[in-house]
């Protein structure tokens, strides 16, 4: 067998075997690898490279070595699930770096971090003042988790006791000027609706780079030509404004009429409509 063909077959075999071993070990991001998994990854890769190019030794020797190295993290993970002591030994422990706005210098030295390294990681988390940090620790993966002090945390609707619409997944129904039928059907819409909305916006289908629709039926368009301004959907806001106008009209009718029975009727209808408006407001005003 020619050398080039032998190397090709060995390389394909090594790659296939590596894929199988990786599926066995499990999927983790690089930054989540433990010490052992990192060492095993390097070693197995080196053995695979040796297996692909070294033609004197038998292939199964390399396969056995790769299998032994790859199975070790699986065993280690199983043991870690059974024992907290072994889990701490294999994976390490989290280290507190900042507590109540105070940097713990000894822990920084323990993790071999400089002040510049710490500030860089804080900036990645959009934190620019150490005094704003209530608690920060380095996870076993090497990532730094940050908890801001209460007064420095962003204000959320929960803090303001505001009702908001639940998060929803938008459906991409136009991509590169082509209507996507499956997401369109998922959204409960059809091509006729898309063409009608495009006509309202004064946009040709082939000029649309991306079109996305939310559960409320509002269509967002991004065009190839960024200089063209697409009008924002106003249907929900117009409907909400109409409801508010109707409620205001009912209150006005209640004030103008001299018939006591009709006055009570208008007031009751106004209150019921206001309740409806309060319920739908989070969904219509975004």
Image (cartoon, helix red, strand yellow):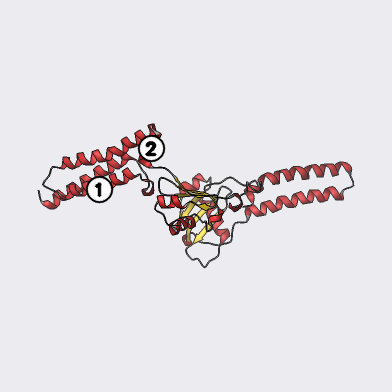
Q: Nearer the viewer, residue 15 or 171?
A: 15
Quarter-wise, where is residue 62 in the image? top left
Residue at figure coordinates x 38%, y 31% from the top left: 82
Quick one: label 1, few (<14), some, or many (20+) residues within 10 Å? some
Q: Residue furthest front?
A: 106
Q: Position of residue 64 (x, y in %)?
A: 20, 39
Q: Nearer the viewer, residue 232 or 120?
A: 120
Residue at figure coordinates x 42%, y 42% from the top left: 93
Q: Position of residue 185 (x, y in %)?
A: 49, 45
Q: Nearer the viewer, residue 127 or 191?
A: 127
Q: Residue furthest right?
A: 258
Q: Residue furthest left?
A: 1
Q: Position of residue 199 (x, y in %)?
A: 55, 59
Residue 196 in view in this figure = no
Residue labelled with disc 2: 87
Tell me the mark number nearer the camera, choosing from 2 and 1. 2
Quick one: label 2, few (<14), some, or many (20+) residues within 10 Å? some
Work out how far the residue at label 2 is from the one at label 1, CA to CA, in angstroms: 25 Å
Instruction: Say what secondary structure mark 1 lies in.
Output: helix
Residue 258 in view in this figure = yes
Q: Position of residue 177 (x, y in %)?
A: 45, 58
Q: Is residue 65 left or right of residue 94?
A: left
Mark before the other along the chain sequence, 2 or 1: 1
Q: Nearer the viewer, residue 135 or 194?
A: 135
Instruction: Say what secondary structure mark 2 lies in.
Output: helix
Residue labelled with disc 1: 45
Residue at figure coordinates x 38%, y 46% from the top left: 32
Q: Is residue 200 left or right of residue 206?
A: right
Q: Residue furthest top?
A: 82
């Amino acid at each position: 067998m020619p050398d080039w063909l032998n190397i090709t077959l060995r390389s394909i075999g090594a790659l296939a075997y590596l894929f199988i071993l990786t599926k066995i070990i499990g999927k983790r991001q690089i930054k989540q690898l433990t010490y052992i998994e990192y060492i095993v990854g390097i070693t197995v890769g080196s053995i695979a490279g040796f297996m692909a190019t070294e033609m004197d030794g038998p292939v199964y020797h390399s396969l056995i070595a790769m299998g032994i190295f790859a199975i070790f993290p699986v065993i280690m993970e199983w043991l870690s699930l059974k024992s907290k002591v072994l889990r701490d030994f294999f994976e390490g422990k989290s280290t507190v770096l900042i507590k109540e706005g105070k940097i713990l210098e000894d822990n920084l030295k323990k993790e071999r971090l400089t002040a510049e390294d710490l500030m860089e990681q804080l900036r990645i988390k959009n934190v620019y003042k150490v005094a704003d940090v209530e608690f920060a620790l380095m996870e076993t993966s090497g990532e730094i988790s940050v908890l801001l002090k209460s007064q420095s945390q962003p204000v959320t609707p929960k803090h303001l006791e505001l009702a908001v619409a639940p998060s929803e997944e938008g459906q991409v129904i136009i991509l590169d000027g082509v209507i996507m039928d499956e997401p369109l059907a998922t959204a409960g819409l059809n091509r006729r609706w898309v063409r009608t909305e495009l006509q309202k916006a004064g946009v040709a289908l082939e000029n649309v780079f991306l079109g996305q629709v939310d559960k409320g039926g509002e269509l967002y368009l991004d065009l190839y030509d960024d200089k063209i301004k697409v009008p924002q959907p106003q249907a929900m806001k117009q409907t909400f404004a109409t409801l508010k106008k109707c409620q205001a009209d009912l209150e006005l009718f209640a004030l103008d009429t001299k018939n006591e029975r009709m006055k009570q009727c208008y007031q009751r209808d106004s209150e019921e409509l206001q309740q409806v408006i309060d319920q739908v407001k989070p969904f219509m005003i975004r």
